[in-house]
Amino acid sequence: MAIRAMYENSSDVGVFSLLTNAYCLVAVGGSMNFYSVFEAELADHIPVIHASVAGIRPIGRLAVGNRKGLIVPNTTSDQELSHLRNSLPDSVTVQRVEERLSALGNCIACNDHVALVHPDLDRETEEIIRDVLGVDVFRTTIADNVLVGSYCKFTNRGGLVHPRTSIEDQQELSTLLQVPITAGTINRGCDVIGAGLVANDWS
């Protein structure tokens, strides 16, 4: 199922929200229409939580998570961290990390089993990803782009990658992730996949 939404005048819904199989985070400060799209589709199944990270709204680019955990940058305030921990299901571990590449959502793409990460991510951050999200971690690029979280999106059922990803790389990613992968664009030709959509296993 696919549903269209806009955050104010932006079609970059992946910048202002983060969706997993266990929860959905939406940025504070947007129109009620944006929230109502998520709540109508998801509220019967998972919590839809209004939140910010580092006092700003692009939560989908700053945080990364799956059904087991959520990782946020060290610029996340104690109040924001407390709000997330109190709002998320008890089964979800929330961890703040010291990482110079602080736009974690741009640098990391994951589902419930595998994470693809920026080649220059700190080793300590890699270990936290492995422990908190419960995934296997692989350093890679997508179509020669190091911002893997920006240029692909995948769930436990399939994924979409940058349109210039070669057939060989698509097959390699598919084998690595154990899900079907295809190349393409979103929002009328945009190749920044992670910014333009959110997805989980059923929506």
Image: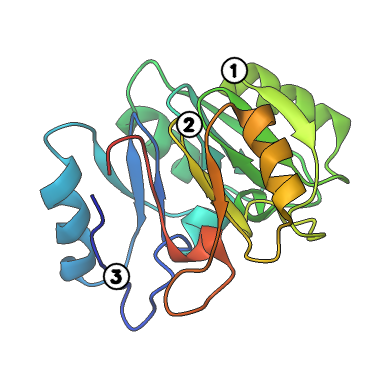
Please give left or right for residue 155 compared with residue 126 in the image.
Answer: left
Q: Which residue is mark 3?
A: 30
**Which badge, 1 or 3, is on the more N-terminal residue?**
3
Q: Amino acid at mark 3?
A: Gly
Q: Residue at x 26, y 56 (%)?
A: 2
Q: Secondary structure at mark 1?
A: loop
Q: Which residue is mark 2?
A: 66
Which residue sits furthest bottom?
Answer: 9
Where is residue 201 drawn, in percent x and y?
Answer: 35, 34
Q: Quadrant of residue 113?
A: top right
Mark yes or no: residue 56 visible.
no
Mark yes or no: residue 191 visible.
yes
Residues under numbered marks 2 and 1 in contact, where contact means CB atoms less than 8 Å apart: yes
Q: Secondary structure at mark 2?
A: loop
Q: Amino acid at mark 1?
A: Gly
The mark found on residue 134 in the picture is 1
Q: Quadrant of residue 84?
A: top left
Q: Quadrant of residue 140?
A: top right
Quadrant location of the C terminus in the rendered image: top left
